[in-house]
Amino acid sequence: MEAIWTLGSPPSGQFSPLSGQTRSDVVIIGAGITGLTTALSLAESGMHVTVLEAHTVGAGCTGGSTGNLYSTLAKGLAPVRKKWSDEVLRDVVASRSQAIDSIEATVSRFGIDCGFHRRPLYRLVAQGKESMRDALEEERQAMLAAGLTVQEAESNALPVPIITGVKLENQAQFNPLAYVRGLARELVHLGVTIHEHSAVRDVDYKRGVVETEAGAVEAEHIVHATHTPKGINLLQSVMLPSREYGVSARLKPDSAYPQGTFWVLDDFHSLRSYHHDGDDYLMVIGEKHKVGEGEVDDVYPRRLRDYLSDNFDVQDFTHAWSAQQYSPADELPYIGRWHGRDKVYLATGFAADGLVWGALAGAILGDLILGRDNRWHERFDARRFTPVKSAKQWAKENVSVATHFVPGYLSVSKLESLDDVAPGQGKVATLEGEKVAIYRDDDGKVSVLSAVCPHMKCLVHWNDIESTWDCSCHGSRFDTQGEVIEGPSYHPLARRTKDS
Ligand SMILES: Cc1cc2nc3c(=O)[nH]c(=O)nc-3n(C[C@H](O)[C@H](O)[C@H](O)COP(=O)(O)OP(=O)(O)OC[C@H]3O[C@@H](n4cnc5c(N)ncnc54)[C@H](O)[C@@H]3O)c2cc1C
């Protein structure tokens, strides 16, 4: 599954892996929008920064996102208003508008070719969803309270049947992968050292040393720009990890491609167009589910393809992909210092709005490290304690986590023989008294791994759509050989003897 953004992005593989020991003022783990924006802010002030990326620049959620930049939130501002206040609403919108402006300024300063355009954003109620009228009205009031200028959406904004909607002008879109890869190239000119294929396996906080398989970086400041912090962190117990899918298509000749960000409340589909090298594409994102709890087969991408075919004149489908998000418990992201560690920083809880939160986080973390004031830090402080605002999700998350811990997990079958696992299939089973994750590839070769997630000892689940092992508890994901794809785990699934 590959996202559309490789069309129009510089190729990956520009940076060599870390090898040997080195020193830096700051080490940033993760080269998505958060890590690279933080690096920019520090490099401009003369700090020496090393960025360690497990895969390639932008290969995380940044390169799997939709590339929309907006001052509101996908879930809406109304939930923030309910939990917080109009003052917080105004801060959310003002800080996000500032972050979008800063992305635009970076694009123009370095001439990054990433298709940045100002575009309107629509929030539309689909026909048949009359019950969502009230929610839209509540959202309109929240937008107004936040200081946004809200217009009525045109009734023909999309060919999808719509009953009502609102429109915000002057939001934006870009190719997120092209942006971060272009930014990475410029950072090198500013003295930043970037290493790809350099997964951090451990951090010794006492000595300030970040270790990969082949090397180590010693630094005064350590930034976890890894979407969710690596290792064990309190915030993981209140965030909800979920996956969402995207597909893109070309339409038949002379079809119109809608220009803007379109959120259709039908339950939720996000649509936008993309122009590259003389061709137009239309994409739809949706079908969200909790990590590790998805359906089997091609069901989610298929539903999205059906959605496009039902509403547009599709000529052919070009890409399909998925990405992960971490929703915060109290509707706001967590940006700042790690609990109990003053020179360790993190930025997480971005939900589906983190291109903008990531750009904002880069500015906040840069200022914290440089000892400068930042007007937004207190509002989004990662150390804030909001038990009342967070309680509902905390309870929901922890009931869910409890059902996936090894001793309490009931639905593991006992496997009589490895032949019970078909080619291309994975299965969690009890084999010789141990919970194992068994995968048989299309050539019949079997790999047997421990099914226990190294992060916090939950059981992984087979993800039939992406052929991965996914942990529902905190979102760690592993490939069929057990290597970490994403999530908080530093370590791969342990290998067990092969019997193929
Ligand atoms: C389907 C979908 C669509 C979205 N669309 C939008 C959108 O249109 N607009 C918007 O604002 N937001 C959107 N988001 C959210 C947004 O994409 C993310 O919040 C944002 O990209 C997060 O950026 P990041 O840099 O913090 O994380 P990432 O981009 O995930 O970067 C983290 C990096 O850390 C690396 N890493 C992890 N572990 C290690 C390790 N051990 N060692 C070294 N490196 C490591 C990863 O490989 C990765 O490259 C969307 C999310 C989803 C799921």
Image (cartoon, rainbow, N blue to C red):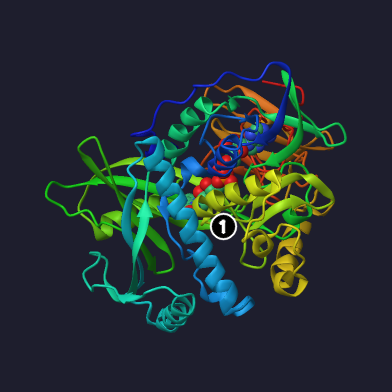
- Quadrant assignment, res 391: bottom right
In the image, residue 60 above or below residue 52: below
Q: Which of 421 and 142 is in front in this view?
A: 142
Q: Which residue is drawn at the image coordinates 70% and 52% (left, top)?
A: 336
* Left-right relation of 51 to 65: right
* Left-right relation of 499 to 59: right
Q: Which residue is drawn at the image coordinates 54% and 32% (left, top)?
A: 424
Q: Which residue is drawn at the image coordinates 74% and 51% (left, top)?
A: 337
Residue 295 position within the rendered picture, expressed as x and y whole percent measured from the top left: 54, 52
**SS state under label 1:** loop
In the image, residue 369 above or below residue 334: above
Residue 377 position within the rendered picture, expressed as x and y whole percent measured from the top left: 66, 58
In the image, residue 277 above or below residue 229: above
Q: Nearer the viewer, residue 161 or 32?
A: 32
Give the amino acid type for the residue marked by disc 1 in the picture.
Answer: Ala
Q: Which residue is drawn at the image coordinates 60% and 22% (left, top)?
A: 445
Q: Is residue 485 visible?
A: no
Quarter of the rendered structure image containing ligand 1 = top right
Residue found at the far top of this picture: 20
In the image, residue 403 above or below residue 36: below
- Quadrant assignment, res 54: top right
Q: Can residue 252 be seen in this view?
A: yes
The quarter of the image holding the N terminus is top left
Residue behind label 1 places its C-beta within 8 angstroms of ligand 1: yes
Q: Which residue is under mark 1? A: 351
